[in-house]
Amino acid sequence: MTTTRDPDHDPSRPAWLTPQVVIERFFAIEAARVTHRTVRTYASVVDRLDTFLSSVDVAPFIGEHYAALLEAERQFAPQGALLRLFGLEGLVYCLPGFLEPQWLAQVPSERRAQIALTGRLLDYLRRRGLIDLQEVACAYYTARQAVFDARDAA
């Protein structure tokens, strides 16, 4: 896995289109299609994802070396550290952990939303070419399988 794509080295992606902006846009698009009650559920999923990304041990997903680098970054600014360092590709590597039982919402409707939104986020990133599938194909398909497994278990 490589670290975050530098916008200067990726002319197809504008500098303002950071991983955080991509995720915010995705959730805004999803929220525009649903009722106010569902928007509140989606907001809960966003909060849970932020907490996950700010605190999860990423070593099982991206390896010890990268985990140590992330921990050092979290010492200074935990919010958004994973996305700053590893970009959307790093997110794809870690998303299966977001669907592990300890991270799934306890409320059934929130749990279903978390699983569905994770799958749709993966599809959004792939369809828009926001991740390099040649680089993260295995992680992408592992994450997709985690979505299917979580859906079956829910």
Image (cartoon, rainbow, N blue to C red):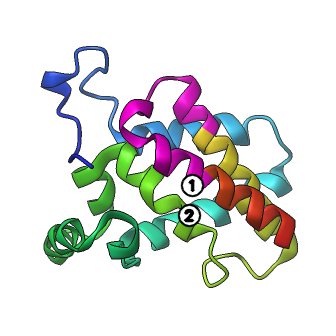
Q: Residues within 10 Å of mark 1 (few under 14, many from 20)?
A: some
Amino acid tagged 2: Pro
| As drawn, 136 above or below 139 | above
Region rendered in magenta: 123-143
Q: Residue at x 52, y 34 (%)?
A: 125
The residue positioned farthest toward the top in the image shown: 12
Q: Depth check: 144 or 53 in front?
A: 144
**Vertical relation: 103 (above or below) 34:** below
Q: Secondary structure at mark 1?
A: helix
Task: Identify residue type, mark 1.
Answer: Thr
- Residue 92, magenta (yes or no): no
Residue 41 appears anywhere in the view: no
Which circle marks residue 96 in the picture? 2
* Numbered disc 2: secondary structure: helix
Pointers 1 and 2 in contact (C-beta within 8 Å): yes
* Residue where numbered disc 1 is placed: 142
Is 66 left, or right, of 34 in this rendering? left
Q: Residue at x 58, y 54 (%)?
A: 143
Q: Is residue 139 magenta?
A: yes
